[in-house]
Amino acid sequence: MTHKGRIVFAAALTATLGLGLTACNDGEDSASTQESPSASAPASSDPGSESPSADTGDDAAAPADGDVAAPGTKLKIGDRAILPFKYGTEKKGTIAVTVTAIEKGAEADMAAFGEKAKGMTPYYIRMKVENVGGTDLSYSSLKLRGKLAGGGPTGVILIGDLPGKCDSESAPREFAAKGASFETCSLSATKTDPIAAASFEEGDAYSDSPVLWTS
C-alpha cells in the first residue's frame, strides 16, 4: 500500500512554508495540510482519507485481556500496552500495541518529501498491533507520534510513509477476531534533538496525557 506524504511544521514557524508544509499554531496537528506530489497516497490519519482512524472515548469496548493502560503510562520499548480503539462512527474495540523499535534513519531518506524536508532526520517507530477485544477492526490504522526526551513535541508532523523504509500498513481483512495481529511503522522526524519516545495520543484523555514508550 502506498501513501502520499505531507509535512506540517510546528509553531516555531509562523508563516506558510509552501506546498506540503503549513505552519501550526500549537506544535500539534491542528493545521490543515496540502499534498506533496513527490511522496506517496494519503495516510489514514488524514481526515479526508476513506480509511478509518483510531480514536478513543468513554464508550470504547472493555478490554478482554488485562487492564487498559491509563493515560500518562510510561513504558519501555518492547512493552505491550492494552488500549481502547475506535474507528468510524460505530466500531469500537480494544487493541494491544507493542513498540518494537525506534530506529534513526538518514536525512537522505527524506528526499521524497521535497526541499522543505532538508535538515530533517527521520525516525521509524515500529510496532506490533493485536486485536484484544475481538471486534472487527479490519482495515483500520494506527499512528504513533515521535517525541523528544521528556515527552516534548518534535515540531514536525509527517503524514505518510517511506516505502521500503517505514511502511504504514493498515490492518488486514483478517484483523477481525481476537488474537489477530499485524505489524506497521509510523514515520516521525525532527530538526532538533533526537526522537526518544513513541506516543499514543488518540482520544481526548490520551491527547492530554499520552502513553509513552522510551528506550
Image (tube, rainbow, N blue to C red):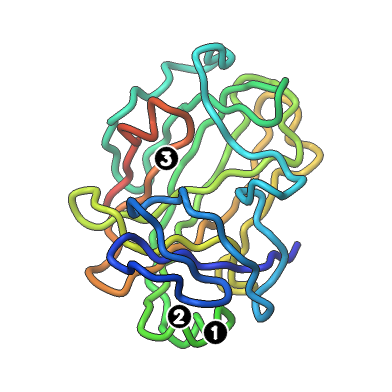
| Dot 1 crowding, Cα within 10 Å, few <14, some 14–19, many 20+ | some
Please state which of residues 25 and 148 is positioned toward the viewer in this rendering: 25
Which residue is depicted at the point 42% across and 76% down? 105
**As shown in the figure, which amino acid type bears the numbered disc 3?**
Phe
Q: Are marks 1 and 2 in contact (CB under 8 Å)?
A: yes
Please state which of residues 9 and 90 is positioned toward the viewer in this rendering: 9
Please state which of residues 16 and 89 is positioned toward the viewer in this rendering: 16
In this picture, is 41 found above or below 65?
A: below
Q: Where does the image place residue 124, in percent across and percent down from the top left?
A: 46, 64
Query: Is disc 1 placed on a helix, strand or loop?
Result: loop
| Dot 3 crowding, Cα within 10 Å, few <14, some 14–19, many 20+ | many
Position of the N terminus, as image quadrant, is bottom right
Label 3, label 2: how many angstroms apart (C-alpha)?
A: 24 Å
- The residue under label 1 is 114
Which residue is depicted at the point 55% across and 55% down? 32
Q: Is residue 187 left or right of residue 149?
A: right
Query: Is disc 3 placed on a helix, strand or loop?
Result: strand
